[in-house]
Image (cartoon, grey):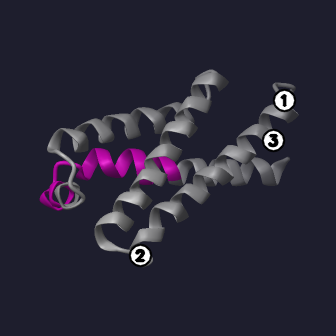
């Protein structure tokens, strides 16, 4: 159980930092604005995506949120990573950068699997 907790917290904190804190601090930069435009999305999408990412990662990192809400956060972030993969592939073709959202999604999935192991051990599901 100790290893499961360690993996859960490492993966969840990485997701929180990478998908919650970093977008909150950098979404207004010219690089982020140009990146969203390059993919063909309107500027309001960048703002909306940042808000959803920050909210979703807060739900994951704060233990007080109920399991059902955490499920929605995991699903929403999964949709984000899969959509990012498809958007980059459709715009720029297949490259190493195209796979980056899938790599981050795998970290999210490790958090998800260990989250459920922790729930089971606590008598949840």
What residue does disc 2 label? 94
Q: Residue furthest bottom?
A: 95
**Residue 122: mark in rendering:** 1
Q: Position of residue 82 (x, y in %)?
A: 48, 53
Left or right of 31: which side holds 109?
A: right
**Is 21 colored magenta in this rendering?**
yes
**Residue occupying the point 65% across, 48% down:** 111
Residue at mark 2 to residue at mark 1: CA–CA distance? 42 Å
**Residue occupying the point 35% across, 58% down:** 87
**Residue occupying the point 41% across, 59% down:** 86
Q: Position of residue 122 (x, y in %)?
A: 84, 29
Magenta part, dominant SS: helix
**Residue occupying the point 46% across, 61% down:** 101
Say which element carries label 2.
loop
Mark toward the start of the polypeptide (2 vs 1): 2
Mark toward the start of the polypeptide (3 vs 1): 3
Identify whether 124 is placed above or below 98: above
Circle 3/circle 1 CB separation < 8 Å: no
Location of residue 33 by image quarter: bottom left
Identify whether 5 is placed above or below 98: above
Structural crowding at the residue carrying mark 2, measured as other residues with C-alpha within 10 Å and reported as few (<14), some (14–19) or many (≥20): few
What residue does disc 3 label? 117
Q: Report whether residue 61 is seen.
A: no
Q: Which residues are magenta?
A: 15-34
Left or right of 108: which side holds 91?
A: left
Q: Report whether residue 94 is seen.
A: yes
Say which element carries label 1.
loop
Say which element carries label 3.
helix
């Amino acid at each position: 159980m100790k290893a499961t907790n360690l993996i859960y917290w490492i993966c969840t904190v990485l997701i929180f930092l990478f998908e919650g804190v970093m977008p909150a601090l950098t979404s207004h930069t010219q690089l982020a604005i140009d990146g969203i435009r390059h993919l063909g999305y309107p500027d309001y999408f960048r703002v909306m995506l940042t808000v959803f990412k920050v909210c979703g990662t807060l739900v994951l990192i704060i233990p007080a949120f109920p399991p059902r809400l955490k499920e929605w956060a995991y699903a929403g972030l999964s949709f984000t990573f899969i959509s990012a993969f498809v958007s980059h592939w459709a715009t720029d073709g297949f490259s190493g950068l195209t796979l980056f959202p899938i790599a981050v999604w795998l970290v999210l999935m490790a958090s998800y699997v260990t989250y459920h192991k922790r729930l089971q051990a606590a008598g949840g599901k």
